Amino acid sequence: MATATQAAAEIQRLVWLFLPRCNDRETLLALDTMAAEPSQWSEGHKLFQRIRSKTLAAERAGDRLSNTQYCFEEVCAKTLYNLSGFPAPFDKDSPDWIRPNALALAKVLSIPDPDSAIRLGA
């Protein structure tokens, strides 16, 4: 089981993988900043809400790339919030969705050998 700090570092690593390949970098950058500073993890709930608005708009527009990106971002924000230990956590399995959502985004972005690029805990 990864520590909270290791989980946050994994989120950062994945953000850095996707950042140069995504047009909308705003919430990816927010995740990076948040993951780097444990005192900010409790802001994950607010960040999730911002990302969720973007996800819903991408779904309505039929924008598969953006939708896939935001789904990845959502589980990262949920995970960081849960790591904060604050009340009313998101579902306990939120971290379990990071890898599948990261793989989906890597495939949409045509990242070569996505399984190797996304490996968690490496």
Image (cartoon, grey):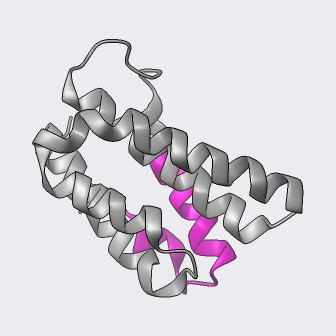
Q: Is residue 105 magenta?
A: yes
Q: Is residue 31 visible?
A: yes
Left or right of 26 in this view: 111: right
Q: Which span of residues is magenta-colored? A: 97-122
Q: Is residue 78 above or below residue 67?
A: above
The spot of residue 97 in percent (x, y) is: 51, 41
Quadrant assignment, res 30: bottom left
Q: Name the image quarter holding the C terminus.
A: bottom left
Which of these two is toward me, 38 or 103?
38
Q: Residue at x 45, y 61 (%)?
A: 27
Q: Is residue 35 above or below residue 91?
A: below
Question: Which picture quadrant has residue 4?
Answer: top left
User: For the point 37% across and 63% down, which residue is it?
Assistant: 119
Q: Is residue 115 magenta?
A: yes
In percent of width and height, residue 93 lies at 45, 27
Which residue is painted at 74% across and 47% down in the image? 56
Q: What residue appears at the point 16 percent right and 49 percent down from the top-left corner?
A: 6
Residue 116 point in image, percent of width and height: 42, 73
